[in-house]
Structure formats: structure tokens, C-alpha cells
Amino acid sequence: MRYELADVFTETPLAGNQLAVFTETTTPVDDTLMQAVAREMNLSETVFVQTAAEGGDARVRLFSTVTEVDFAGHPLLGTAVVLAQHQGAAETSLRIETNVGIVPVTTRRVDEDRYTAWMQQPLPKISPVPDEQSADLLAVLGLQQSLLPVTLYDAGIPHLYVMADSPDAVRAIVPDFPALGRAAGENRARINVFSFTGPTTAVTRMFSPYDRVPEDPACGSAAGPLAAHLVRHGRLASGVQLTLSQGEAVNRPSALYARAVADQDGILSIDVGGGVCLIGSGRLRRTATV
């Protein structure tokens, strides 16, 4: 079982969010084995590339350390770059099949092992959060208020968004993961806390209390809905690029870029991009059964 290792949402190796992409297997891999391999890799996500079935260029299965996820950001960008390198292409436009549909991803080679990649994300379902749950979440985070309504966005992974009143307040959070898991609610949402650092820049942290990687270094599936959240509330102009800093708290500094386009009827499109560094490859032996 051959795999490639990539760091996503960074222009520097050994930063950003780590990813393993399994591109070749000699025999079919079932769900149980894919989950066991993802747990063994112990990264935010592990990807298994399969033959396209719906007219795309490839199909992917995405696994966190504990479960399969229908959609994720950095795994799709990293997988697209791995496929681009295998093709030897300086630029690609790929259509990657996921459990929530086909996601378009473009890549551009910067040098031998560094690329940039952008994806068009599915539009999320948006749900208000009850006042009691919002209050519980703020209390667990140690925050007095959220400057925007606490809101749930779901484009395959549910995310809650809390706007702190300063970047220092975001950086000062000491997460109580069991309490965050209870406050996240029945849908096991990830919790995102952010604050502006400039007109179009922000610092953000994403807590995933149910995973073995409980604070994500860089979360692409959260970056797009965050841009949409800010556009919906008039804090960011439609189509303007938002630059997000994430990962400092876990020593994996990351830079994510997101754009949301809207009109009077709502969000029309969401794009997320960043740097991808290919850092290595390897293989697992198929000598054990699960």
C-alpha cells in the first residue's frame, strides 16, 4: 500500500496540516482496514484514492483517526497535488469525487515539491444555534461573548463559529476537550473560534474534541464557511479574499485563503486555497489482517 505525505496550507515543509494519500494498493481495501490505517497514520485525515465512478478524475475516501468524513478541505487539496505530480503537469484542473459530490480543484506547480491549490467547496447548510447552547459553548471557551451569532455551517462536516473580541482572546483559549465535546451538541460539530487581525485577515483555531487530533493545524472545510459567515453578516465584502492564520497553538503555522461570493439571495460560491508541500512517500506491508 503506497502513500505520499504532504503538508497543506503552507509554503514551508513541516508546517501546515499533515496528510497521507494512499494512491496504490495491490488488493481492494475495505472500510475496516482504511479506518485502521488512518488510525495508524495518526494524522488529521488520511485519503484513499479510488477509480472514479461518476465522471470525475478520481474518487476519494476520507478518514480521520476515528471515522470516515464526507468532505474535508486539506485532504482534497493535497490529493489533487499528489495526482498532479504523478501526471507531471505544471497546472491541472481536476474533478474529485467525494461522498458529497464532485469537487473541482485546480493546482499549479511552484517548484519540484511545492504547489498551490484551490478548490470550489460545496455550499453549506446554515443553522442558528439555540441561545442555551451558545451560552454553554462560550462558558467552556472562557469567552464573555461572540461578536457574531454563534452559527452552525455544514457542507459535509458540521462547524460551529464563535467570533472572539480580540486575537489575544483566541490565542489564550486553553481547550477543555471533554467539555467542548458536550457543548458541541448531538451532531458532534467542530468548534471554530476566530478574530480579525486586519480588514481581511484573521486568526482562527478549530477544536475537534472527538478526534485523536483534537486541535486542527489548518482546516479547509472550516475556512470556506467562515468566509461565507463574514460575508453574510457584512464583515467581509463579497468576493474579497480572506487570509486565515491557524496552527500556532500546535506548532504547525498555517495560512489559508478563502473567498465567498454572494448576492441578495445568499451565498453563490465558496473557494478555498493554499500552499501544498510534498515531503515524502512510503508503503505499508499487507502482512496483517484487521
Image: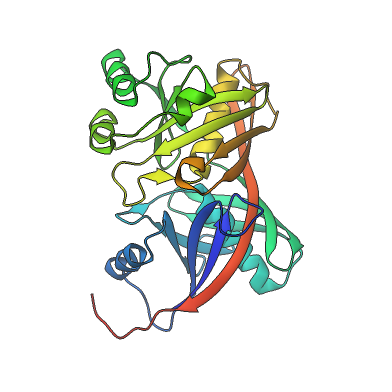
Image position, residue 130 (x, y; %): 30, 17
Which residue is at 27% across, 67% downward? 32
Locate residue 71 relative to residue 35 in the image: left or right: right
Q: Residue at x 53, y 44 (%)?
A: 220
In the rendered structure, the answer to whether residue 226 lies left or right of residue 185 reads: right
Q: Is residue 55 visible?
A: no
Vertical position of residue 82 compared to residue 171: above or below: below
**Residue 233, placed above or below residue 110:** above
Q: Position of residue 180 (x, y in %)?
A: 28, 32
247 shown above or below 133: below
Relative to the observer, which residue lies in front, 128 or 236?
A: 236
Can you give x and y, in whole percent of width and height, for residue 109 in the image? 74, 61
Identify the image quadrant of the N terminus.
Answer: bottom left
Count numbered badges in the picture.
0
Location of residue 286 by image quarter: bottom left
Can you give x and y, in whole percent of width and height, for residue 137 in the image?
Answer: 31, 23
Q: How is the image coloured?
A: rainbow
**x 64%, y 47%: residue:** 274
For this view, does 207 lie left or right of residue 238? left
Q: Residue at x 49, y 37 (%)?
A: 222
Nearer to us in this view, 265 or 2: 2
The quarter of the picture where the C terminus appears is bottom left
Q: Quadrant of residue 65?
A: bottom left
Name the foreground residue: 22 vs 166: 166
